[in-house]
Image (spheres, grey):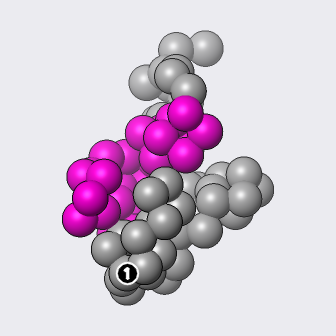
Amino acid sequence: MKINEITSQAVDKWQSIFSSLGIVVGNGKHCPCPVCGGKDRFRFDNKNGRGTYFCNLCGSGDGLELIKNYYHCDA
């Protein structure tokens, strides 16, 4: 399966995907970053159901990017 197929199938399912992987993303308000651990610099905004996020230190990305950063791996 190709990466773009996986991310397409994950639309609107990121919250449960993160939960099943032990990644705490909060409820859309500033909270600790699951990657760098910063106290309140992370926000899960999930634009268009793509699992998007923003951290004032780590930057931004989509759900797959967050998983890659959290587990220090690549796709």
1 part of magenta stretch? no
Kind of residue at disc 1: Asp
Near mark 1 (Cα within 10 A), the count class, few <14, some 14-19 or many ≥20, is: few
Residue 69 lies, with reference to residue 73, above or below; the image says below
Residue 17 lies, with reference to residue 69, above or below; the image says below
Residue linked to disc 1 = 40
Residue 4 lies, with reference to residue 8, above or below; the image says above
Where residue 46 sits, quadrant-wise, is bottom left
Q: How many marks?
A: 1
Q: Which residue is drawn at 43% across and 79% down?
A: 39
> Which of 52 and 59 lies nearest the eye of the viewer?
59
Q: Which residue is drawn at 32% across and 74% down?
A: 41
Residue 2 located left or right of residue 59: right
Magenta segment boundaries in residue numbering? 44-72
Residue 65 placement (x, y as % from top left): 42, 39
59 part of magenta stretch? yes
Q: Which residue is drawn at 60% across and 68% down?
A: 24
* Label 1: which secondary element: loop
Q: Which residue is drawn at 52% across and 78% down?
A: 26
> Which of 46 and 53 lies nearest the eye of the viewer?
53
Residue 60 seen in the current view:
yes
> Which of 51 and 25 lies nearest the eye of the viewer?
25
Residue 10 placement (x, y as % from top left): 55, 44
Where residue 43 sits, quadrant-wise, is bottom left
Residue 45 lies, with reference to residue 65, above or below; the image says below
Residue 65 located left or right of residue 54: right
Residue 41 located left or right of residue 6: left
